[in-house]
Image (cartoon, rainbow, N blue to C red):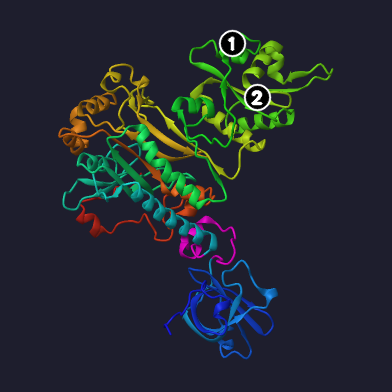
Amino acid sequence: MHAYRSHTCADLNSQHVGQEVRLSGWVHRVRDHGGVLFIDLRDHYGITQILADSDSPAFAEIEKVRSEWVVCIDGRVKARDASLVNPKLSTGEVEVYATGLTVLGEAAELPMPVFGEVDYPEETRLTYRFLDLRREKLHRNMMLRSNVVRSMRNRMWGQGFTEFQTPIITASSPEGARDFLVPSRLHPGKFYALPQAPQQFKQLIMVAGFDRYFQIAPCFRDEDPRADRSPTDFYQLDIEMSFVEQEDVFAAVQPVIQGIFEEFAPGKKTYSDWTKISYRDSFKWYGSDKPDLRNPIKMQDVSEHFAGSGFAIFAKLLEQAGNEVRAIPAPTGGSRKFCDRMNAFAQKEGLPGMGYIFWRAAEDGSGMEAAGPLAKNIGAERTEAIRVQLGLNVGDAAFFLGGKAETFEAVAGRARNEIGRELGLTEENCFKFAWIVDFPMYEKTEEGGIDFSHNPFSMPQGGMEALSGDPLQVYAYQYDLACNGYELISGGIRNHKPEIMFKAFELAGYPNDEVEKRFGGMVKAFKYGAPPHGGCAAGIDRIVMLLADEANIREVIMFPMNQRAEDLLMGAPSEPMLKQLRELNLRVVPKE
């Protein structure tokens, strides 16, 4: 017999009754039933119930074991009584009568429980991550992640893509986030960078003549943490294709992503109609560039109904160029109590509040009437025009925000989500996708200059001609895939012409010599025949987070950092030794 096991803890069933077996694993739980001891023995595969009574030669040793000890048990498989069968376990028809036990590894007193899903402080969980990973839910999440990655690979190969690996140590590149810099020992005073993404390399792969590339790529960005984003590193399904337009990329990606969701979330509906929404319309209708389309509420511009109206606040706002009034319809939200609650929500978000109108049956039985402070101020005719535009009826409401769109859009988007949840309008147990397209190429900086708003390597729509006008009116062949309020994919059709690339960077304040210095490899390559190409990258961590129905991305990463970008288990970041600093010609300047 094998030194440690003849079977795993998920193998045994009624066909093994009477056999002598050997199992190894962790003591998940010990139960004493008055002279009969039970152990739930756990390994990577499952759980088997072990029992020993006073007649068992292993009884005395089993009395000594504690939770999370690693043990090897010899015994005989017995059938459970029909009333004691556990249908939740694959081994629930049987148990093993212990005849021998060897302790392979004792466990000290546990800083946190492994049995059950007790809610423990995250600091403790991350410090003892190896214990945390033994818990059923987290173990299941990690296996889900592994299976998702395997399925992604299979699907990409099946679509004619080829997997290549790109460098992990490279040059710094302005791609929207801070680089992690790596000092060079051989070149004092110079630094490598960990790649924010394989962006330049995958484009060079296309220039080199490889047609369809993919990679499960690690990416490194020194970012502020969020619940749905790791502050240091993450993995993405990186894709690039030659001789393609935007629609070709969409057609290649949808079967992969949709197939993943259908495979790993079979109890939820995965919608196949992936709509396309322009970036500006997405903010206008949903207050976000990653809208949750499970919520049917669509905001609308209702400025014309408030211009010159009796509601002075909005009327004066609309006298200034660039201001607008936007409505958030709230079907079935037509009660003063609900409207006051949403008004309080807006105040918590930092706004003075939200105006509202709700429609109810008229007290005199004449039909419907509008109620609320705004309705009294703007009059019945304007109120009715708003109701008709928004498609509302008795029992419905609408909320209003005004000013420059950028000052209220984000809060309006959160209010839309809150209204959808509160009123039960948001569809449950489904995934809805949308391509967000036509991103602006540039944006204004706080200093009043112009910079890239997203990926600097995207092709401007209209090419060189578009770059001769107002930069803020230039759109890029840039796109994101949104799902249930999260950004899952970002990509674009690339700028493969050197003259357009130089001009695009010039508008963002990068002179030609700076572009040559930062992107010399790409500029050089584009001079020797570059094909039209494009692609995208899908965030694996975020996809698994949605599939696992988790709200925190750390629940699907094996060894995550905490919110302060610290590895509490390994003690990173740590102070370097003086010898290391001398070898790198570095000196740490104390912070004042």
Query: Which kind of residue does numbered mark 1 sit on?
Result: Ala
- Circles 2 and 1: CB atoms closer than 8 Å: no
Q: Earlier in the sequence, mark 2 or mark 1?
A: 1
**Residue 181: x and y, percent?**
28, 46
**Residue 449: x and y, percent?**
33, 23
At horizontal 65% and vertical 24% (from top left) the residue drawn is 398
> Which residue is identified by label 2?
398
**Residue 581: x and y, percent?**
24, 55
Residues at marks 2 and 1, CA–CA distance in whole angstroms: 18 Å
Quarter of the figure with residue 509:
top left
At horizontal 17% and vertical 34% (from top left) the residue drawn is 529
Query: Which kind of residue does numbered mark 2 sit on?
Result: Ala
**Residue 463: x and y, percent?**
28, 23
Whether 150 is drawn above or below 160: the answer is: below
Depth check, front residue: 459 or 440: 459
> Which residue is identified by label 1?
307
- On the picture, is 104 further left or further right than 98? left
What is the magenta range?
112-134
Outermost right residue: 364
* Mark 1 surroundings within 10 Å by alpha-carbon count, few (fewer than 14), some (14 through 19), many (20 or more): some
Query: Circle 2 — which element?
Result: strand
Query: In the rendered structure, does residue 370 fall within the stretch colored magenta?
Result: no
